[in-house]
Amino acid sequence: MLSASAAIGSAGAIALVWALVQFKIIAAIPVKSLDDDETKPLKEGKTSSETTERLNEIYCAIYDGAESFLQAEYKVCFQFIAFFGLVVFALVSWGTGWDYWQGGFTALSFWLGALTSMASGYLGMKVAVYSNVRTTISAQKPGYTSCFNTAFRAGAVMGFALCGMGLLMLYATLLAYRMHYDDSEQWTVLTEVITGFGLGGSCIAMFGRVGGGIYTKAADVGADLVGKVVHGIPEDDPRNPATIADNVGDNVGDVAGMGSDLFGSFAEATCAALVLGASIGKDGDWDGMMFPLVVSAVGIVVCLLCSFLATNIVPVKKEADVENALKLQLISTTILMVIAIYFTATSYLPESTEMASTVGSGTFVLLPVNAWLCVSLGAVGGLIIGLVTEYYTSHSY
């Protein structure tokens, strides 16, 4: 059995390498119209070179807009986290009887979580804008396989890079703090100071989702008003310059904001689980205490394997296959995770652990199968929510 350090480190590295591989596949698609006959009109009387020039023009406009927005937003974020980190330091130090080490480590965790969240959002925006134009190029090919795979791989770049970066950063921070809290009796404090990591991620997620969301909605409504109401042209018509702002909003709100939000959710859930399971570390069982991070490591491998279902094993060939491919991803990853987590729990968790009750003064015994059941119910519950939401919102039903 791999140690927790080996499992987490290797899974994080695999995620980053796989994200790079997916990006290289996308980057291999040239931003050039697939029609090489310069005299043959592709659309609206335009030749291949004219279409390519127009694609690059729109791509650069959206890229510049998204870049400018994030730079302006992140300047505010830097100022906020610099100030709020000092507030965290002061309050934690005061609340722990002026333990400056605990306050300092919590503030440092906050800054690291915030910076990682900002990097996740920025990476998501870069990859999305970079891939949008290449998905358009791929859509010129017959069928749906090429353009779906390009879009799917673009999402995989952000997803795997975000998880790998977050997992490695969180675990590296834990290992660094363990050099100070070297006694297993102090590992409860270690899990408490690392909660700042989740707080930092959540703060930037708030800026990304709220700030980016307000911008994208304002741009969307503004473009629709000036286009459909004032000039009577269809939505997203290329004759309406405001559609550029609309597309910029989609990238900074729905992609960059979502990237920060996903990282915040990952960091919060993992840090909270570490605090709850801190009693396992009192016996010196570091691997058992790192079980929440090992679950994320296993999830990376499971998602990597299941991604081949959409791109290679059951490729998308018609429009209806898009919905089925994404649904297959949800179902297959959930099934494999339920199976994999059982063996993970029995391998990394102790045979039994006595934990204090949340309510009252009693204790209860935690078995590996109990942890497996909790993770499984969460995974299956998320799947059910997704399928029910799809049923009530999808045009297919």
Image (tube, helix red, strand yellow):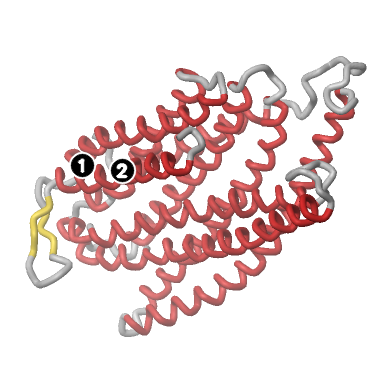
Q: Position of residue 296 (x, y in %)?
A: 36, 44
Q: Residues within 10 Å of mark 1 (few under 14, many from 20)?
A: many
Which residue is disc 1 drawn over?
345
Q: Nearer the viewer, residue 390 or 294?
A: 390
Residue at coordinates 62% horizontally, 59% vertically from top-left?
212
| Above or below 44: residue 341 | below
Find the distance from the CA under tag 1 to the CA under tag 2. 15 Å
Q: Quadrant of the C terminus?
A: top left
For the residue marked with disc 2, what is the amino acid? Ala
Relative placement, left or right, of 138 versus 265 is right
Q: Which of the 4 image quarters holds residue 41?
A: top right
Which residue is disc 2 drawn over?
379
Relative placement, left or right, of 153 versus 88 is right
Q: Position of residue 154 (x, y in %)?
A: 59, 36
Relative placement, left or right, of 331 versus 346 is right
Q: Nearer the viewer, residue 381 or 224?
A: 224
| Above or below 89: residue 317 | above
Residue at coordinates 19% horizontally, 48% vertically from top-left?
371
Q: Position of residue 330 (x, y in %)?
A: 39, 35
